[in-house]
Image: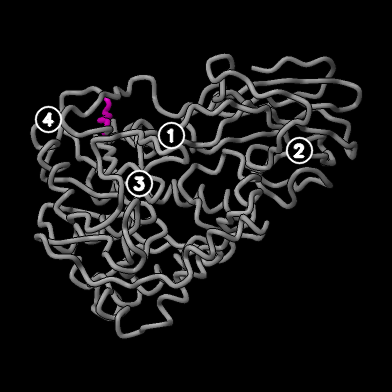
Amino acid sequence: MATAVGAPALHVEPGPSVLDGEPLHVHITGAVPGSRVTLTAERWFAALSTQRRRPQLMRSEAVFMADPRGRVDLRTSAPLHGSYQGIDPRGPFWSMLPVPGIERASPDAVDTTQVVLRLRADGAVAETRVQLLPALPAVRVLPADGLPGAVFASLPGARKRPAVVLIGGSEGGSLITQAAGPFASHGMAVLALPVFSPPDRRGAREIPELPAAWVDMPVETLNRARDWLAARPEVDASRIAVHGTSTGALLAMLGAVHLPWVRAVVANVPSDVVWEGWGPGVPAGQRSMFSLRGDPLPFVPTVGYDEEIRGHERNLPVIVRRAFERGRAADPARAAQARIPVERITVPLMVIGAHDDQLWPSGQMAQNIAERRLAAGLATETLIFPEAGHLLYDTGYAPTTGYNAGLRKTGGTPQANAAAQSEVWAGTMRFLKRVLAVSEE
């Protein structure tokens, strides 16, 4: 697993291949007690996108002091200095920065799942590699015929599996389909369902068959997913959960309120109220995001959204959260009418929020949901992070250092975001396995 010159050795367990998101144990043995050892990690990485982005080489570096037994254990050792601070077993992974002077690679020319770790200690060098598998090799990912842009993923097997419908956020398009394989690796059948496809800067639309705007979207949109899953012989249609992220979390919760077949919900960085719809040709503040049985749902208009977005023209930070906060404050009575009646969700519900979310105040809105349900005597599994931002939909092992690098801010520190992602990923899998009674194989 590792090659070394001299006594120091680098270990990564359970390597050399591990399902992304599973705990990794990185430790060093054989160093001179009290000596300084340097650990670097490198990875070709392309951020999640609907485009085939060119990966860039990323690197982290941290210097440790070997303990009296000549060991360094990332579960108990903090670096003296380097890319991250404090005890963090995931530190070398999330704290990577782009390596200057290295051109981006062709997407097909490098292995973006492989992380190379190198140790320099006492004049010796050791190297080991670990592959972070996005999904188990046995997972089958297929187009969901009849559902534009959607994919279905499942492990093979004779038994019927419970299912999860994945709904993405305001990015639209096929990005949510990249999560199908990872979820399916944990024993669930998964339908990743794009629900709209906005135009890009050039006016092109990735999935033209879908709506270009998120406006008056029928809550009944989810019924298409349920009907499609019910026709699959490997799916137990009596056990279907809906997992929604950001704006998709609203659709997931509204589905649990109004559609009897939903058996559980995960609402990741949600809102507790319905907001105005948006998209090409949609006048600001005039249309709702959602409809039910053909009628638009009450909604809250944002205030100053376009002005906030135009901040980049003046080289100012773009903090979209402020438009939502101003909109809510402008008309509390309207916000009360637009509230999602979460006390009517009788199935298990998990809500996840972040108080430093700069896209919208998901921390406070997740707290509102949990408090409303507590007042109704309903339990809610709640994860709210004080220092994290909006981007909580990863495993905690991908670099988080670029989230706020541009003018449009998503919030959170790199370390807080990675820690929250790890907890969210593990907690979501535990929740879904429990409420859907996923069988261990």
- Does label 3 or label 4 sit earlier along the sequence? 3
The crowd level at tag 3 (other Cα within 10 Å; few <14, some 14-19, many 20+) is many
Q: Position of residue 243 (x, y in %)?
A: 30, 49
Residue range highlighted in magenta: 150-155
Q: Residue at x 84, y 47 (%)?
A: 80
Label 2 amino acid?
Val
Label 4 amino acid?
Arg
The residue wearing badge 2 is 72
- Does label 2 or label 3 sit earlier along the sequence? 2
Q: CA distance from mark 4 to mark 2?
A: 50 Å
- Does label 1 or label 4 sit earlier along the sequence? 1
Is residue 416 left or right of 8 when viewed as pictured? left
Q: Nearer the viewer, residue 135 or 96?
A: 96
Q: Position of residue 440 (x, y in %)?
A: 29, 35
Determine which of the numbered discs, if any, sits on residue 109 in the image. none
Dot in front, 1 or 2: 1
